[in-house]
C-alpha cells in the first residue's frame, strides 16, 4: 500500500496499525513473490516505490544486490528500518520520497516494484513514463493494483465521503484494462497478468523492450 504526495499525514497516523494488519490473501501474496523472484538475479538493483513498512522489500532482499525502497510516510519507514535491523538485512535502503519527487538515475534499475500504489497516484501515465525511464532496457516493472473502478456502485460512492472524513486516502477508480492500456502506451510489453479471482487486485509484469531481462518462468 502507498500514498499520494499530500497523504503523508494520513499514512503516518495509520502506520502502527498498518504494520500489524494481516495479509488478506496469503496464497496470492506468495504467488506474486514467487513470480517476481523468478526474474531476479543476485546482481540486480531494484526500486520499490510505496514500500510501506518494508515487508516485501525485505523478503526480496536475499535475491538481489540492492533495493532502494521509498515511501512518503516517515512513520512507515521507521517501522521498516526497525524490521531490517531486526532481520539483519543490510542491502535495502529506505528513503523518504513520493514517487513524483524521487530523484534517481535514468536506466539505473533492473526492476521496479509498484505494489498497491498505482490507484493512489494522481497521474498514472506520468508515473509509468517515469518507471520506464528509470528501468534499464529489458528491465521489468511489477505492479499489483486494486481496481476500484470495477467495484460496486456503493463502494465507489462511499469512498469520497470516507476520504473527506479522513478515513481513506484519495484514490483513482482504475480498471485493469486502463492500467494495461497505459503500460502499452508508455512502451511496455506486458509479459504476465494474473488475478486469483474476479475483483481481486490485478498483478502485472511489464517489460521495457531492449536487452534480454533475466529469464524467469511464469
Image (cartoon, grey):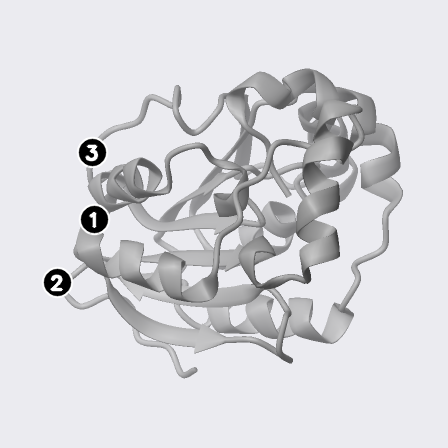
Residue 179 spot, x, y in % from top left: 38, 57
Describe the element under mark 3 as helix, strand or loop.
loop
Residue that badge 1 annotates:
136
Q: Could one spot residue 25 in this view of the protein? A: yes
Residue found farthest to the bottom: 217
Screen quadrant of the N terminus: top right
Residues 190 and 67: in front is 190
Q: Earlier in the sequence, mark 3 or mark 2?
A: 3
Residue in the foreground of this view, choosing between 123 and 68: 123
Q: Are marks 2 and 1 in contact (CB under 8 Å)?
A: yes
Give above or below for 137 relative to 10. Answer: below
**Mark 2 → mark 1, Cα distance in angstroms:** 8 Å
Secondary structure state at the residue bearing disc 1: strand
- Residue 152, by quadrant, is bottom right
Kindly report the distance in space between the C-alpha atoms of the residues bearing marks 3 and 1.
8 Å
Q: Secondary structure at mark 2?
A: loop
Labels in figure, total: 3
Label ID, residue 211: 2
Q: Which residue is mark 3?
A: 106
Q: Residue at x 43, y 29 (%)?
A: 99
Q: Earlier in the sequence, mark 2 or mark 1?
A: 1
| Quarter that holds the C terminus | bottom left
Residue at 64% from the left image edge and 69% from the top image edge: 200
Work out how far the residue at label 3 is from the one at label 2, CA to CA, in angstroms: 16 Å
Residue drawn at x 85%, y 55% as measured from the top left: 22
- In the rendered structure, the answer to whether residue 70 lies left or right of residue 47 reads right
Q: Earlier in the sequence, mark 3 or mark 1?
A: 3
Amino acid at each position: 500500500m502507498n500514498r499520494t504526495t499530500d497523504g503523508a499525514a494520513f499514512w503516518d497516523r495509520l502506520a502502527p496499525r498498518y504494520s500489524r494488519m494481516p495479509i488478506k490473501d496469503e496464497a496470492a501474496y506468495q504467488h506474486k513473490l514467487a513470480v517476481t523472484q523468478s526474474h531476479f538475479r543476485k546482481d540486480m538493483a531494484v526500486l520499490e516505490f510505496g514500500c510501506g513498512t518494508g515487508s516485501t522489500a525485505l523478503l526480496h532482499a536475499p535475491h538481489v544486490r540492492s533495493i532502494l525502497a521509498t515511501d512518503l510516510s516517515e512513520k512507515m519507514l521507521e517501522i521498516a528500518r526497525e524490521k531490517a535491523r531486526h532481520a539483519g538485512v543490510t542491502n535495502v535502503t529506505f528513503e523518504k520520497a513520493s514517487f513524483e519527487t524521487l530523484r534517481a538515475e535514468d536506466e539505473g534499475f533492473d526492476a521496479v516494484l509498484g505494489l498497491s500504489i498505482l490507484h493512489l497516484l494522481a497521474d498514472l501515465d506520468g508515473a509509468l513514463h517515469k518507471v520506464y525511464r528509470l528501468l534499464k532496457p529489458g528491465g521489468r516493472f511489477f505492479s499489483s493494483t486494486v481496481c476500484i473502478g470495477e467495484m460496486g456502485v456503493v463502494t465507489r460512492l462511499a469512498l469520497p465521503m470516507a476520504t473527506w472524513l479522513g478515513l481513506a486516502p484519495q484514490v483513482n477508480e482504475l480498471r485493469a484494462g486502463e492500467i494495461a492500456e497505459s503500460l502499452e502506451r508508455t512502451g511496455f510489453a506486458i509479459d504476465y497478468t494474473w488475478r486469483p479471482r474476479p475483483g481481486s487486485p490485478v498483478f502485472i509484469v511489464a517489460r521495457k523492450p531492449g536487452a534480454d531481462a533475466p529469464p524467469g518462468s511464469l
